[in-house]
Amino acid sequence: MTTTDTSELGPRGVANETPPSDSGSPFPTFPTFPTTPLSATPPGAPRPRPVRRTSRMEDLLDKVVLLLRAFAGLFSLVALIVLASNKHGDWEDFSRYQEYRYLLAVSVLAFAYSMAQIIRQRSQTRGGLDLVPIQYSWIVDFSGDQVIAYLLISASSAAIPITNHMRETVTNIFTDASAASISMAFLAFIALAVSSLISGYRVSKNYI
């Protein structure tokens, strides 16, 4: 009659199974690895940014920039229409003064730029094709806003002295229209200057 060693029995009378060793055992042994929860963040690692808040902020900035460029396009259009129609004969003709011709050319350029940017931004929103690669998009926006804003303030500053000199002598529809055109160009400058600040913030946030 054979006897069973009670030290080898488990709590329910089942013999304890000892893992076979590497020496002389026909069964392979499998190593065990420590498990780490998927949600655990390693110490010192940066926390992930809230995607929902970032997307809302980007959407808000897109809307603000679109509105600013719409204002810039509107003010530039008014400036060029008022200045181009400012012809009343003799010396009251804007084409006789290079300052006003410069202001007219810059107003046309600012209007074309603003409209092109609005169309491009609307195409991006609807998932259309963008001619500018996404990694350079904000750099192009920042550079374009800066250049056109500089041209607008330069043209306005060039036309102010001659307009003030004329208004010291006579004030009529020609001088009033010139002053109104300068004011519209300056408002377009403010709109694009604010837009360039937003574009600069995006560039510094994503590339620096």
Image: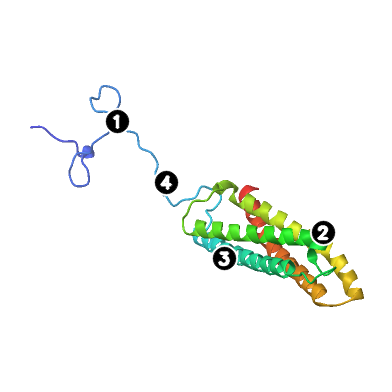
Q: Of the residues under marks 1 and 3, which one precedes in the sequence?
A: 1
Q: Whole-percent x and y of residue 156? A: 79, 63
Examine the rendered structure and indicate whether residue 76 appears above or below residue 25.
below
Q: Mark 3 points at which residue?
A: 63
Q: Of the residues under marks 3 and 4, which one precedes in the sequence?
A: 4
Relative side of 43 to 170, left or right: left
Q: Of the residues under marks 4 and 1, which one precedes in the sequence?
A: 1
Q: Which residue is drawn at 58% across and 61% down?
A: 118
Residue reaching furthest front? 90
Q: Mark 1 points at which residue?
A: 29
Disc 4 and disc 2 in contact, CB within 8 angstroms: no
- Could you tell me the amino acid type at mark 4? Thr
Q: Mark 4 points at which residue?
A: 36
Image-quadrant location for residue 34: top left
Q: Name the residue under label 2.
A: 98
Disc 1 and disc 3 in contact, CB within 8 angstroms: no
Q: Is residue 45 visible?
A: no
Q: Which residue is drawn at 65% across and 61% down?
A: 111
Nearer the observer, 205 or 40: 205
Crowding at mark 4 (Cα within 10 Å: few <14, some 14-19, many 20+) = few
- Could you tell me the amino acid type at mark 1? Thr
Q: Of the residues under marks 3 and 2, which one precedes in the sequence?
A: 3
Disc 1 and disc 2 in contact, CB within 8 angstroms: no
Crowding at mark 1 (Cα within 10 Å: few <14, some 14-19, many 20+) = few
Relative side of 52 to 79, left or right: left
Q: Whole-percent x and y of residue 77? A: 66, 66
As measured in the structure, the alpha-carbon distance from the residue carrying label 1 to the one carrying label 2 is 91 Å
As measured in the structure, the alpha-carbon distance from the residue carrying label 4 to the one carrying label 2 is 74 Å
Q: What element carries label 3?
A: helix
Q: Is residue 183 visible?
A: yes
Disc 4 and disc 1 in contact, CB within 8 angstroms: no
Examine the rendered structure and indicate whether residue 132 appears above or below residue 107.
above
